[in-house]
Amino acid sequence: MRVVLIQFIPWDRGYAFEPAGLDLSIGEIVVVNTEFGQEAGKVIGFGELSDEEIKELGGLKSVERIANREDTGAMKENNKPRKKEQAIDYCHKTVKRHGLEMKLVDCHFSFDDQRLTFAFIADGRVDFRNAVKDLTKHFQRSVRLHQLGVRDEAKIAGDVGSCGFGLCCRGHLKVLGNVTSELAEQQQVAHRGPERLSGVCGRLKCCLAYETGLYEELAKKLPPIGTRVRTKHGRGEVVGWHILKGSVTVKIDQEKEGERNMIVEVPIEK
């Protein structure tokens, strides 16, 4: 079945719904009924789910309608900056009163104004059950605390990256991938140090993953490390790669005992 992915909060994931015959497009605002109440969100993508996958999800709800001017007006009214600031300020005081080690990042009022979600970051898990009880009593709404990673925080509050352009996570990059130190080693930039390889979030830059496919393809053309090869300098062993240059580093065999090792760079075509 074809499904539409709808995101209700900028820092939350997309949820699958049945399009219900509506002609929807990316970026369109729609109104849906969820198990928690009525909500409005943005279309962020489309996909296919099998009957088995839909069954595991407990079935799919349908999109009710494309949002009209009244709907979008209600969304803006519910999440006015001043209203959010006051909510975050009270939540911050509550968190401090309960001695919780967490940093509040943002909050979101639902479309029907019956639910309030606070986003926070923290090192490890936080037992905030008592704090939620106090917040629920004060706001007279269903309150949820949603833990984010530091990358998600940058996606919400970040600005410009070291490249001089806006952060990818705030623009075209909708899904934050798994960026590891192996990517830096693969691209032979690990020697630059964590300061130059880290983004404003303090984690490895997401753009390290952009050229992974190219490096993997070029690496297939190079002989494995440890391979014995013949060069114009003599026979030797491959001890390193220069992927973009299309060459390898070869340690030439010693012809005489006590002779100094010779290390040469050899283009693979030769």
Image (cartoon, rainbow, N blue to C red):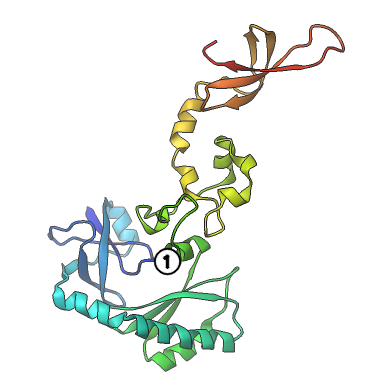
* Residue 212: image location, x then y, percent: 47, 37
* Residue displayed at 52% across by 22% down: 246
Residue 52 in which image quadrant: bottom left
Q: Is residue 164 left or right of residue 256?
A: left
* Residue 92: image location, x then y, percent: 51, 84
* Residue displayed at 36% across by 56% down: 171
In the picture shown, does residue 38 fall above or below 54?
A: below
Front in this rendered view, residue 102 or 63: 102
* Residue displayed at 53% across by 88% down: 93
* Residue 5: image location, x then y, percent: 28, 59
Which residue is situated farthest in the front direction here?
Answer: 164
Q: Quadrant of the C terminus?
A: top right
* Residue displayed at 21% across by 61% down: 18
SS for dot 1? helix
In the picture shown, does residue 203 fall above or below 232?
A: below
Which residue is situated farthest in the right direction here?
Answer: 258
Q: Say few, some or many: other residues with alpha carbon within 10 Å of mark 1 (under 14 / 14 to 19 / 20 or more).
A: some
Residue 69 in which image quadrant: bottom left
Q: Which residue is mark 1?
A: 156
* Residue 242: image location, x then y, percent: 57, 26
Q: Is residue 136 left or right of residue 194?
A: left
In the picture shown, does residue 125 fall above or below 260?
A: below
**Which amino acid type is shown beneath numbered disc 1?**
Ile
Residue 112 in which image quadrant: bottom left
In the picture shown, does residue 243 fall above or below 100?
A: above
